[in-house]
Image (cartoon, rainbow, N blue to C red):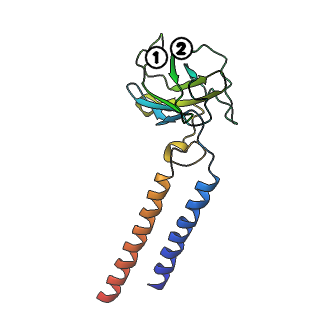
Amino acid sequence: MVKWTLLTLAVALACASALPLRTASAQQPRDPLISPQEGADGSRFQIVGQSGWTPGETVTIRLAFTPTDPLAPDGTDIWTGDTYHERQVTVLRDGTWSFPITVPDELFPFILGDTPGFILVRAESPSKNASNAWVYSPGGRRPPGAEAIAGLGFGPGAPSPALATTLALFAAATGALLILSGARRQKGH
């Protein structure tokens, strides 16, 4: 009983101590923020200019599709191909902007079909430029170069710490059930 209690306590403490470190050391989300970071045909995405945009300026958003990751490991935009589907949005007083978009709702002059890849978003205004990409994963198939672990909620491309928190709570609950089960068995003997 003591062994299981100590083991469960050690696991719970390890999970609890790892969560603040993970969120404190996680990279800031790229601007523009794309949520969710992955989807297929018919998926709806929200694209958000988070901060630092000049209020009142017009931001031009251009989209591109590529089977390979259009962003370098440091996050810079390295795409040199064509961009398609242009939209414009005005920056709000707080220096942010936002709009929803559905894939492939007239985005490209071709059908994406079942080819996995990346959709690059370039946001350009007179005072600021930013790029980000989301993973186009038809049928759950991801393109080469997509961080598999990011989809699980870990790593620099993680959408949020919610999965890590859920896993920690699950581990703690499982440990508690093991303790209760062990205590019940010992009473029965």
Please give the name of the residue rendered at 46% of the width and 37% of the height, measured from the top-left corner.
36
Could you say whether the residue bearing mark 2 is in a helix, strand or loop?
strand
Q: Is residue 121 something one can see in this rendering?
A: yes
- For marks 1 and 2, the one nearer the N-term is 2
Image quadrant assignment for residue 175:
bottom left
Q: Residue furthest left?
A: 188
Disc marking residue 107: 1
The spot of residue 30 in percent (x, y) is: 60, 37
Please identify the quadrant where the C terminus is shown: bottom left
Q: Is residue 143 something one can see in this rendering?
A: no
Q: Residue furthest top?
A: 109
- The answer to which of 44 and 188 lies nearer the viewer is 44
The spot of residue 172 in percent (x, y) is: 44, 68
Instruction: Determine crowd level at label 1: few under 14, some 14-19, many 20+ residues with C-alpha closer than 10 A.
Output: some
Disc marking residue 84: 2
Quick check: 101 left or right of 119? left
Please give the name of the residue rendered at 67% of the width and 34% of the height, measured from the top-left corner.
75
| Amino acid type of the residue that numbered disc 1 sits on in the rendered structure | Leu
Using the image, determine if residue 102 lies above or below residue 185.
above
| Amino acid type of the residue that numbered disc 2 sits on in the rendered structure | Tyr
- The answer to which of 164 and 25 lies nearer the viewer is 25
Mark 1 near mark 2, Cβ–Cβ under 8 Å? yes
Could you say whether the residue bearing mark 1 is in a helix, strand or loop?
loop
